[in-house]
Image (cartoon, rainbow, N blue to C red):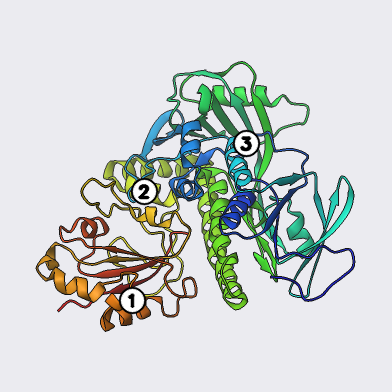
Amino acid sequence: MPHEETEPGVQHSPQTLIVGAGPTGLTLGIELLRRNMPVRIVDREDRPHPHAKAIVLWPRTLEVFRRLGVADEVLARSVALPAANYYSDGRRVARIGFEELAGSRFATPLSLPQEQTEAVLREAFQRLGGEVEFGRTLTGLDQRGGGVRATLDTPDGPEHLAASWVVGCDGAHSTVRELAGIGFAGLTYPQTFLLADGPCETSLAHDEAHYFMTSRGVLVVVGLPGGGYRVFAGVREFAESDDPLRVLQEAANERCAVPLRMTGSSRTGIFRVHARRADRFRMGRVLLAGDAAHIHSPAGGQGLNTAMEDAHALAWRLALPGADRVDHEVDRWERERRRVAASVVSDTDRQTRMWMLGGWRGRLRDTALAAGQHSGLLGRLAPPRMAQFHHTHPGHGPAAGWIVPGRRVPDLPLGSGPGQRPVHVHDLLTEGRTVLLVLASDAASAARSGEVRRLLATGRDSRRRGADSERWLRVVTRRSPAAGAADGVRLVLDPAGAAHRGTRVRGPLAVLIRPDGVVERIVRGTRR
């Protein structure tokens, strides 16, 4: 959106300025370029960050990668993690398996160091014509004239530019957040955390995560691509003169249930863990996403995944036509993502405190974990929550089987014709548009399939649409600013009932699905 005011020395552009070239900023940049929206990504570092940082990628994030066209590359570089094991004082008390994570074709989380995730995304951004501008530091923000004026410190001196939006994807120490005057309240855990990525000699399964909870603190071991491991531990005291690898090895010796020896060269890190959330994610046309908006414990590997969802859920909104519509949807994005961030901060804080329980509380925790695994409750409830399949934004109307307004739509098979590849729900989202999915019949209504077809005929030729179907489509899209009118329609005639069984619904059903895979609205057909 161009600016109405002019000012000498300011380059005016309708572009979005993204500050920060990590996974959050790159995801946002790719999605905007896919929608032909002008964008710049700047980063204060001189080069891509070389450290592993986050390593766990959950299926919901892998679904985003698929829409970005990079899922195959990510899968090829990663290690699958089909299970997580929890030990207490040397004894395994629970094992959570992810192999049957329902509703996604990505059955398990993956392990991939963040610098490799960034490399894949950066290559995709460049293929679309984008370029990450390193060595540029944001030094000023000024909102006026319906946009944002930004000042960058560059190798060639100060640069002044104008943008429609500025999105802070610049991490926990966000300059965008500071310049916008947005608070970042929360707490800091008393422990210092150490990590090392490198080769290890151990009998622990390389393709599973291992959590060792002891009265002396937690130790986490996760396999990495190439055969190495991440070893992560919290310690009460750590002096700057201490050797982090030696301290970490000592923690492994006293906490790990089986021998674990770190060998060869390892990359080490020392950090504190915080649980904080920005007071707001939007200040006019300045937005915050990822660690700039929320930071929390690494428990469960939620940080990078939540951040990429922030970006993916924002991009299609910024690309909508009409300033009022964009403004409404960005407000809605802020409300939704603040709810998600609050839930993630709370969940990871709870898990971190669970790691540290001792005495009778620790024994109670162990009993609950063991009972949960024995009953199957742990396996049914924990994986969908860790994968963030449970988040439900305020929506319209009741659920229909597995399809819930305000929640991610399950990626279930919709069947296929003779000689055709099976079609899944999420295949309909790869073009980045809102989709109207119409399930037109099931086995129970097969005898009346002709009537159902007439009622739900949604071909592109409007002359084929009866008055009833026109009215129904208006009901589905009415008061849905995310869609306006449906961008794409997929009619699934299901006389054998396969799609209906997969979604656990009966009879005709229309589902309006947002570009980020969230169900906007459900309308049931009338069954006579």
Q: Compared with residue 130, is residue 97 higher up or lower down, i.e. above or below?
A: above
Please name the residue that numbered disc 1 is placed on: 462
User: Label 1: few (<14), some or many (≥20) within 10 Å?
Assistant: few
Q: Quick one: 56 or 383, which is closer to the camera?
A: 56
* Mark closest to the chain's N terminus, 2 or 1: 2
Q: Position of residue 131 (x, y in %)?
A: 69, 46
Q: Quadrant of residue 266?
A: top right
Q: Position of residue 432 (x, y in %)?
A: 48, 58
Give left or right: position of 241 versus 379: right
The amino acid type, in three-letter code, at marker 3 is Glu
Please name the residue that numbered disc 2 is placed on: 104
- The residue sitting at 32% across, 82% down in the picture is 471
Q: Tell me the CA gap for discs 1 and 3.
A: 49 Å
Q: Quick one: 355 or 15, which is closer to the camera?
A: 15
User: Label 3: few (<14), some or many (≥20) within 10 Å?
Assistant: some
Q: Tell me the CA gap for discs 2 and 3.
A: 25 Å
Which quarter of the figure is the N terminus placed in? Answer: bottom right
Please name the residue that numbered disc 3 is placed on: 115
Q: Quick one: 481 or 212, which is closer to the camera?
A: 481
The amino acid type, in three-letter code, at marker 1 is Ser
Q: Position of residue 204 (x, y in %)?
A: 44, 23
Q: Quick one: 433 or 348, which is closer to the camera?
A: 433
